[in-house]
Amino acid sequence: MVKNIMTKKHFVQPSYLQVSLDHLVNDFLNNPKDVNAIWKLGRRLSYNLWPDESNFMTQVIKNLKEKWEIGKITHEEILLLGMAYQAGAGIDRDRRLAETYYQHLVELEYPPALYKLGGIKENYAGFNEAKSLYERAAKADYAPAWYALNLLGDRNVDENLMQACHLDYAPALSKYCTYSQDINYGIRAFNLGEPTAAYQVGYFLKETGNYEEAIRCFEIAIEQGDDKSYNSLALIRWKIDKFQDLAEAAKLFGIGTRIGPGHEECTKNLYRLFTENRNNPEVIYHAGLANVISLKEFNNFVKNHMNTFVALSMDDKYEDIRDLLDKDLRDIVLQKREERRIKIQKELEVFFPSPLGRMIRFFETEQLTDFKKEENALTQKPRV
């Protein structure tokens, strides 16, 4: 069951980090009773928006405020105004104004607004006021409110969490997966768009020795924005013989040192991997790129393995090598790189006398790095 659901991406819902903001807004407005639609939109609004997303939200807010002024606005649209001001999405953050919109709906006992205002009160007013609002929303069987009561540490902690799970609230399912170590709850959470659930399922699979499926789960989790998975996936690529790929492990650890939770663990593991593989140029490269070793130490490795690093620098994947070198050493590497390119071209001319034959062979052996770079630069479109 895990294999069928977790490894075929058309079976799962993309996470809130992968879906366009306008789609999340429309999904919420068209499905106001879907608690996961509200959750996804709220989480997405809390992230830094791209300029085009911010402009989109600015226009949405303008349109909704016009509706507010003439009194022709739905409960969901008022809630969206409050969420936008609370997050500062497309507008300056204004908690007081967000409370005003929520309060208007609270007076109508609108469960999502009770929950949202409860979240503000929990952070700025205190436990009792927040709990009262959550309990009012929970009476309407509003799943996020049950989950919030669980997080507050209410005396019925387990019952509150299970109630949220029964209502298929993704964050609650994800938490219960960790709490109960029941992989099926993680699968359900992942199918509802919670990216961290893929990590949890992968973790349990790894612990039981199902490394192939664990790798797939961690890869999906990374694609969906869960940064904790870099370390777990890299450990498999390092430690498990059947799946060992030291260059890939170093690359994953290196990315993990720069983003998200677990960066300290990735830094520690990348250094350990480096100390065990001091003659592996790809591992050395990623250790240098991640600043796990000093630039001076990295430059010394390049001097001692010049030909290897020159060959490596001709691959697009490792072009940053030159940025890690001091000026004199960089000039030497570039010179030897050009000499190597000329040598390869001359060898090709012997075996492939015609220009067309040389060109075909050159591209087959992926040695036309500079030409490929120019092509990529011309064809790559900037984000707008």
Image: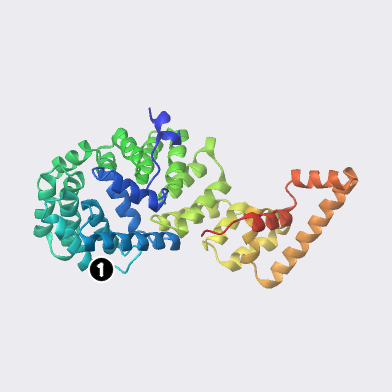
Residue 103 appears in the rendering = yes
Amino acid on which disc 1 is placed: Asp
On screen, 44 above or below 6?
below
153 or 330: nearer the viewer: 153
Q: Quick check: 172 left or right of 157?
A: right
Name the residue located 71 percent from the left edge and 72 percent from the top edge: 328
On screen, 347 above or below 56?
above
106 or 299: nearer the viewer: 106
Badge 1, how many Cα within 10 Å: few under 14, some, many 20+? some
On screen, 136 above or below 300?
above
Q: Position of residue 182 (x, y in %)?
A: 28, 34
Name the residue located 44 percent from the left edge and 42 percent from the top edge: 220
Quadrant of the frame with the N terminus: top left
**Secondary structure type for disc 1:** loop
Q: Position of residue 62 (x, y in %)?
A: 32, 63
Task: Report the residue marked by disc 1.
Answer: 94
Q: Quick check: 279 left or right of 120?
A: right
On screen, 137 above or below 330?
above
Residue 154 appears in the rendering = no
Q: How is the image coloured?
A: rainbow
Where residue 126 sits, quadrant-wise, is bottom left
Name the residue located 61 percent from the left edge and 65 percent from the top edge: 324
Q: Position of residue 225 (x, y in %)?
A: 42, 50
357 or 242: nearer the viewer: 357
